[in-house]
Image (spheres, rainbow, N blue to C red):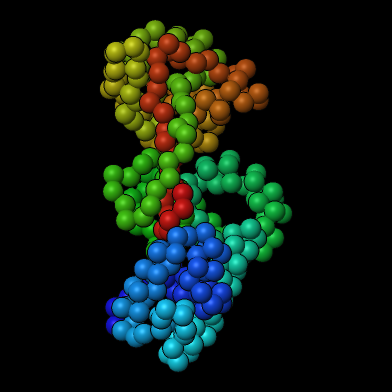
Amino acid sequence: MDPVDLNDIRIFTVVGQEGTLSAAALKLKLPTSTVSRALTRLEKSLGTLLIRRSSRGHVLTDSGREYLQVCRRALRTLDEGGEMLALQREQPSGLITLACPITMTNLILTPIFHELLGRYPQLRLQIESYTPAADQEFSKDIDVVFKVRTPRDSVRRMRVYPSTRCGLFANIQYIETFGMPSRPEELPTHTCIGSGPWQLSRGNTTVTPSIQSPIILNDPSVLLDLTLENRGIALLPLYMAKWPETASKFVEILPRWTVQPVTLCALFSGHYA
């Protein structure tokens, strides 16, 4: 038996309900010839005559009547399954496991937990925070993995979010003590904290200063604290450096140079992004 087409089954069910090909075609808003070809394909796939054609009309065979009942039950089950899935999309429930960088958990996810769970009270979240610099494999049981940088290859589907703009910043006291660098080439003479490399662009010119940080890390919340403590120049997301409570304490370094943005992406299994 060849695989049958679900659409052909639906057409056959309507024919059985309406009694004639022309009535079924009218209800389905299809040409009668299309309905006839669908029935022929279905009979060929099943290897069974379902409708006996004659000049006086079309009559279901015994096999056709029995198969029609089975098709009605099957289609009713499929429709119920579709309604169930539609309801789950509107009111999702169950456990979702996320793997997120620590800073994203603290600064982005935590503030929206109340709103998210208030909107979807049957939803449960399990969050595994990790350090972006860690070279680790994630369990297949994790539904969504947020990455700070787009991976080169992955068996999961990927959704890329708008990039986070960054800049170089230092505490005002640091600049008063050590001076303001005027060119990227001067950065190696300053205390630069974080992880490199730092890629800076201006027009058609792109440079990567050779910095050696005494403190190597890429957690922006920790870098923010270290910069506030006057430990050196750091690469920070603009939204953090320009918070009202921090903006007055910082000076942007080389503001005419553009720093390579940070891209956040989500890796997941499934068909929807």
Tell how many labels. 0
Query: Residue at image x 65%, y 60%?
Result: 91
Looking at the image, residue 103 sits to the left or right of residue 53; the answer is: right
Residue 86 sits above or below residue 204 on the image: below
Quadrant of image for the N terminus: bottom left
Looking at the image, residue 137 sits to the left or right of residue 233; the answer is: left
Could you tell me residue 137's position as x and y percent? 35, 57
Query: Residue at image x 38%, y 58%?
Result: 138
Residue with the most extreme right position: 118
Could you tell me residue 51's position as x and y percent? 42, 82
Could you tell me residue 35's position as x and y percent? 43, 67
Could you tell me residue 100's position as x and y percent? 48, 49
Query: Residue at image x 49%, y 12%?
Result: 175
User: 49 or 105: nearer the eye?
Assistant: 49
Tell me the quarter of the picture where residue 206 sits.
top left
Answer yes or no: is residue 128 visible: no
Residue with the most extreme bottom position: 62
Answer yes or no: is residue 179 visible: yes
Residue 108 sits above or below residue 230 on the image: below
Tell me the quarter of the picture where residue 148 sits.
top left
